[in-house]
Image: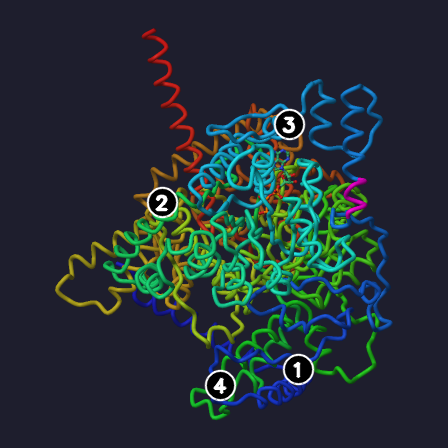
Amino acid sequence: MVDINKYLESQLALAKQRVAIKSKKDNVSQKSKDAAELISKKQSKQFGKHSPKEDPKDIPVPTSSRTRTSTVSSEKDSDDEYLPSEDEPDDIINIAAAAGPSTSTLPTRTKHNLKRIVDDGDTTSYNERIETWKKNLAAAKSGNYDGGTMTADVQYVLEGNKDPEEPHELQNGLCVPNFIWRQLYKFQKIGVKWLWELHQVESGGLLGDEMGLGKTIQIIAFLAGLSKSDLGAWGGLGPTIIVAPATVIYQWVSHFHFWCPHLRVAVLHHTGSHAGNHNQLIRDLHTAHGILLITYAGVVKYTKDLTARKWHYIILDEGHKIRNPDTQVSKLVKKFQTPHKLLITGSPMQNSLQELWSLFDFMRPGLLGTYNAFMDHFAMPITQGGYANATEYQEATALEIAKALKLIITPYMLRRTKAEVQSHIKLPEKNEQVLFCALSQEQRDLYMGYLTGNTVRSILDKDNKYGDPLRARILVALCTLRKICNHPDLYLYEAHEDCDDIDPERFGNYKRSGKMTVVNSLLKIWQKQGHRALIFSQSRGMLCLLEQYLQVQEFKYLRMDGSVNVGQRQNMIKTFNENPEYLVFLATTRVGGLGVNLTGADRVIIYDPDWNPATDDQAKERAWRIGQQRNVTVYRLLSAGTIEEKIYQRQIFKHFLSNKILIDPNQKNVLTTSTLQGLFTLEELNCDGDTETASLFKHTKINVDHNSRSKKSDDKHSTESTSFSKKKIEAMKKMAREISKKISKDKEENKEEKDPREEYKKKRELLLNPPKVEVPEINMVDDQVVNVPFESILSELDIVNMHAKKDYEENLLKNVLKSQENAVKEESDHGEEENSEIKKEKDEGTHDNNCKEKSIREKTPERDKPLDKFAGKKEIKKPHKRKHDTDPEIDNVVAVKKVKKKKHKKDKEKEKQKNDDDYVLSKLFAKANVKSALQHDVVVGLAEKEKRHRIKEEAVKKAKDAVRAIRFSSK
Ligand SMILES: Nc1ncnc2c1ncn2[C@@H]1O[C@H](COP(=O)(O)OP(=O)(O)OP(=O)(O)O)[C@@H](O)[C@H]1O
């Protein structure tokens, strides 16, 4: 039976730890208290302007004054950028302003002389383009082509095909030009056929393929088909409107010009080539049955003139922008009178089910009923059933309703994931990690100062004597905390905005921000390794600091945010993709993160998380898409223990919700809603050295061998356990299971007595003895902690971890050690096998290392030796020093590289990426104060799903082959 004294001892240690944390919290510097006071006062004044009677939902969030770092005078206030996201701003035309900051502290940004893409708004330039295209085509046909603007049909002819007009005819007469059709992937052809089917039944639809799978080309191929087929009332393709975010409208132009050069494509925007009256352009385009490209803001602006005409097609690119049914633009796009409404988005559902309703209300009005009916009968039960504390009945109901909803929407929504079509597109690997970065001492001090300041106190005050709108206070406080997480100066210069004594040496210095220190390490390693990076931040202020850093380090970069002219964005992207001299593409998540192709980069940093996971997902998908040749690694940076962790947890919940409808109604949730109090605390690392989220999702945690850590590492939280070999941990788990069993047995024996710790034991057993640790059923996390209240999980995990890791606990377990002997022996044998394998390796260093280790072991005093027979295994597994393949100068390379004989090329590539990433991680752990790392896609439960899908696909393929084989054999 477990010794109750030991149990109490561990509880006591935990309590002491908490007291220590609390006393640390009280230790906030005067400087930080003053700053918090100043800011709280300013914020208080802003709250005072609002009437206490206002409905919290309608309260505009007060905007505080712009930070000094902001470079563009006309930009919106930076607080907006930290709030739950809405639209990206259209462009701000004043490029000169964007070229340099207002203070002399920042170096001037280099201006890039980028060419623009010209649309067909201006009749003369349109006619010239058509002339040139026809000449090129004729030259290609006659063999005299000397390198003009390339189009898909010219390419087709140059490849030896005679007739560029040759169509590929689909059932019922749609003639897609063969020069496009042959270029489509199989799943894209299916997409075009699906669009054609919808057309024939006069229905709208949602093309929801995952980002980067070529939705644009599918739409263009379909429209090209219509325009080449003499069908229906419009005689083929009638006038069409495509609404798209400002950043991608010129991407559409260039795609149309390449794939479908005969169509007239004009941009209705002040950057477009049309000089005259907008109504004239609308009229011309309408008559020419052309394509009118317009931004979402443009729809609002020109709505009267646009809706006055009949259009054949209206297509919304990044159509999730109308996910809120109450916005003006959502209401306006629904006014167009045509059944042919298409919506394109890689993130069909981002936050809630009401969004799905809004999208369907545009392209298939009535299908999901009225808003109220849908919310009552579908959205509410599904959401309720998703909470971790849902009853069994609620869960079952949610499941059935989610299934029904999926059935209803399936015919009108086509969504393929990259995993599903991987065999067609052969995308390289992607590795996605969440890095928990420690705050710098200064950030920590400021953070605590603000938490104990007036604004936060007023929020947490239950009586809310202040009478001003709580929601506004919360939002402002959250924004402020997020600024501190990014860099102290984003906060401090708000506090001291009237003061002019900026120290240029100190201002924006990367060492003062935990996350920037990580960025610094990453970029330096990546530059050596030949990688190129995208860095996304929510805030332009932060972008300025990052820009300043890049300039100081003399890293070549490009920067794109709302201040860059819409007409130039496409060329900026092209320049980055084509010129490897640029190490970094810096962008705001909302401007650079949507719709664009940035495959020139193979590394992505999401500097700060958005409340909406889809915003971050969109951003990271800029690099991992068709056209990418190299393995991609994505790092999401989170400041450990702060509001950013809470945002990440919220993201996971939202992921769960959209997966439930779009992928698998069986998905279970793991998190309950966190309390207000929880948002305004600074969590300390637990006794395991983990952050809150890392311990919650500990099975997705990436363990870097700490032998590869720098010896100088001052990480006092690093735990002994992390250097245990996998097998030792496994064996420990086995031991832990034995204890659990023993506890259960004891409990059984004393069934009559109600043990107050019964509940605890049950949960502990669940945690210690998870049903499937390595291969999760649905979501690794679900299996273990579902139905356990969020708050209680954390403290219990602490105890469990201590049980599993402390030596004294191992002593306590002596009574079960015997039963483990066989297992341990087995492992020992296995270890010896490995040992002999290693010995076989011709690397002489191996032997040396083993010898060295042996001598060290001999010198180790008895009490410091590893406790049991694991010791032998640990020595055997300890990797010999090996220089990293991509960077021979650096020691301390990633260890635990198993010796295997033959590997396939793909495995090798995979391993190389893993080693690259492990190496980067080991450096980060050693130098840059990264506290822990999680595998993001595993956290959101998708990786497993994708794997299973692939397995299933393979199985189905096998079955089909088998059927074919039988048929063939009978013939
Ligand atoms: N069949 C194809 N042949 C060649 N290139 C292709 C093909 N399909 C897609 N691509 C390329 O893949 C990239 C991604 O395509 P596209 O921008 O249309 O993706 P998307 O699905 O619209 O992504 P997002 O949702 O991020 O906007 C583009 O560079 C495009 O040119």
* The one of 933 and 482 positioned closer to us in this rendering: 482
Residue drawn at (57%, 42%) of the image: 215
Earlier residue among tags 3 and 2: 3
Question: Dot 4: what SS?
Answer: loop
Task: State the CA–CA distance, disc 4 to disc 3.
Answer: 60 Å
Question: Dot 1: what SS?
Answer: helix
Earlier residue among tags 2 and 1: 1
Earlier residue among tags 4 and 3: 4
Task: State the CA–CA distance, disc 3 to disc 2.
Answer: 45 Å
Residue type for callout 1: Ser
Residue receiving disc 3: 179
Residue receiving disc 2: 777
Task: State the CA–CA distance, disc 3 to disc 1.
Answer: 65 Å
* The one of 116 and 503 positioned closer to us in this rendering: 116
Residue stretch in magenta? 123-128
Q: Which is closer to the viewer, label 1 or label 4?
A: 4
Task: State the CA–CA distance, disc 2 to disc 4.
Answer: 47 Å
Question: Dot 2: what SS?
Answer: loop
Q: Say if 651 sits above or below 450 in the image.
A: above
In what quadrant of the picture does the N terminus appear? Answer: bottom left
In what quadrant of the picture does the C terminus appear? Answer: top left
Q: Which is closer to the viewer, label 3 or label 1?
A: 3
Q: Which is closer to the viewer, label 4 or label 3?
A: 3
Assess disc 1: are there few (<14), some (14-19) or many (≥20) residues with their C-alpha within 10 Å of its C-alpha.
many
Task: State the CA–CA distance, disc 2 to disc 1.
Answer: 47 Å
Q: Quadrant of residue 63?
A: bottom right
Query: Can residue 617 be seen in the rendering of this structure?
Result: no
* The one of 542 and 144 positioned closer to us in this rendering: 144
Residue receiving disc 4: 54
